[in-house]
């Protein structure tokens, strides 16, 4: 048992901070919070935060630890030839690389993440390795392989189906691999040949087969959806989480509100102002396509936010140049879009926990909750940029980073 003292706490919900507090941690849980603490807790180790600011550990509701879409070109030869032919060790390389990505993400203050699609079930192995303590990473929840109507996205990321029975069978396969959620790919990737935003990959009967099978086990279903029709088809088919939400019209937004569905906005996927690294790595045609899609996505998310659609923080890290360990940059994009600091921070803590059905033990700082904590130098409600420089991270009561 130990205590964090001289802490100013954002509890994940309230705009008013808990000032000069002590947080007593017993095992992996918060045992007690002492506001305006005038005495030091006795008979335990004390960690003086010196007035620093505490938040619940951040939650990223959509990333890909198996992916590194725009890597350092010098690393490519570790798993493929100069001509692009994959070596036999490709999956092993992806697995070792994902361990480093998990560690970077945890040290950035993200104590819980949800992976929107792994490579050849490497995510299953990584999740179990983290839970058993072999490698260091956040609490890791996975979707396994995306269920899709045609081969798309990245190697090893999807399983192709046709018809409701095949969809149901593929959901059962993901359940066999003990995945935590089911992921549907409802729209072709941005860079696909023949891409059409108005086309839904799966039919309504196929969507309903997936949600019926998943919901029978209490599993959430999320969908990669870029286009008004794919979003509306997903909602009509009882999908729980809409990822990206590019091109939503007023009817789609109203359906989001009526269903109470969460949007996973991923404003960096794609960003209408891509990084120079991404520009250098892609053809001019693809860069222009990313920019145009980014502008459309930002407009859609802005309209959804203003209408009151529920938003859960998501980055798509690993894809389209979004680097692992820099997940918090998404919060600055959300601010640029017009979201308030309190709504952004809630989206990455209490609202994210609700969206992922994890609100029973994380996302807020209060007695009985998991001791998942991010410590910053400044008040993130006043200076949001401080989330990009987390000084201390506690996951399940264990200190994994301390830089003061």
Image (cartoon, helix red, strand yellow):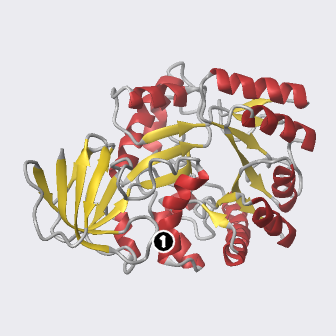
Whether 78 is drawn above or below 386: the answer is above
Instruction: Give coordinates of residue 17: x percent, y percent.
Output: 34, 74
Whether 390 is drawn above or below 203: the answer is below
Quadrant in the picture for the C terminus? bottom left
Quadrant in the picture for the N terminus? top left
Residue depicted at x 43% and y 40%:
139
**374 relative to 337 in the view: left or right:** left
**92 relative to 197 in the view: left or right:** left
Residue ID for mark 1: 332
Tally the marks. Answer: 1
- Which residue is at the front of the view, 87 or 49? 49
Whether 227 is drawn above or below 305: the answer is above
- Which residue is at the front of the view, 66 or 89? 66
Instruction: Give coordinates of residue 293: x percent, y percent.
Output: 72, 64
- Quadrant of res 313: bottom right
- Quadrant of res 100: top left
Say if residue 129 shows up in the picture: yes
**89 relative to 265 in the view: left or right:** left
- Which residue is at the front of the view, 349 or 120? 349
Instruction: Give coordinates of residue 183: x percent, y percent.
Output: 70, 40
Residue depicted at x 49% and y 46%:
113
- Quadrant of res 292: bottom right
Q: Residues within 10 Å of mark 1 (few under 14, many from 20)?
A: some
Say if residue 150 shows up in the picture: no
Element type where label 1 sits in the image: helix
Residue depicted at x 62% and y 38%:
117
Instruction: Give coordinates of residue 79: x percent, y percent.
Output: 50, 29
- Which residue is at the front of the view, 85 or 346? 346
Residue depicted at x 60% and y 64%:
267
């Amino acid at each position: 048992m130990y205590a964090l003292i001289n802490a100013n706490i954002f509890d994940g919900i309230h705009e008013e901070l808990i000032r000069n507090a002590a947080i007593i941690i017993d095992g992996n849980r918060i045992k007690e919070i002492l506001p305006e603490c005038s005495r030091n807790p006795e008979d335990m180790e004390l960690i003086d935060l010196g007035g620093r600011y505490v938040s619940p550990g951040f939650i990223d509701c959509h990333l890909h630890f198996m992916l590194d879409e725009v890597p350092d070109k010098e690393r490519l030869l570790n798993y493929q030839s100069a001509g692009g032919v994959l070596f036999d060790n490709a999956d092993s390389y992806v697995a070792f690389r994902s361990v480093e990505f998990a560690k970077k993400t945890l040290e950035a203050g993200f104590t819980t993440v949800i992976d929107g699609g792994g490579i050849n079930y490497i995510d299953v192995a990584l999740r179990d390795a983290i839970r058993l303590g072999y490698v260091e990473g956040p609490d890791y929840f996975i979707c396994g392989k995306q269920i899709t109507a045609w081969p798309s996205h990245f190697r090893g990321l999807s399983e192709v189906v046709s018809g409701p029975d095949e969809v149901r069978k593929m959901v059962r396969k993901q359940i066999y691999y003990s995945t935590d959620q089911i992921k549907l790919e409802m729209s072709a990737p941005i860079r696909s040949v023949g891409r059409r935003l108005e086309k839904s990959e799966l039919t309504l009967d196929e969507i309903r087969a997936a949600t019926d099978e998943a919901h029978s086990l209490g599993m959430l279903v999320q969908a990669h959806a870029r286009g008004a029709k794919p979003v509306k088809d997903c909602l009509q088919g009882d999908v729980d989480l809409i990822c990206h939400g590019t091109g939503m019209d007023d009817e789609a937004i109203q359906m989001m509100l009526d269903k109470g569905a969460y949007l996973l906005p991923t404003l960096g996927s794609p960003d209408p102002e891509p990084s120079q690294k991404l520009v250098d790595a892609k053809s001019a045609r693809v860069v222009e396509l990313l920019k145009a899609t980014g502008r459309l996505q930002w407009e859609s998310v802005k309209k959804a936010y203003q209408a009151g659609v529920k938003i859960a923080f998501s980055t798509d890290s690993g894809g389209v140049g979004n680097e692992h360990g820099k997940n918090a940059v998404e919060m600055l994009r959300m601010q640029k879009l017009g979201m308030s600091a309190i709504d952004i921070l809630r989206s990455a803590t209490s609202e994210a926990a609700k969206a992922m059905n994890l609100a029973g033990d994380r996302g807020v700082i209060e007695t009985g909750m998991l001791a998942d904590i991010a410590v910053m130098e400044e008040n993130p409600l006043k200076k949001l940029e401080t989330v990009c420089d987390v000084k201390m991270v506690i996951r399940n009561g264990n200190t994994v980073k301390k830089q003061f």
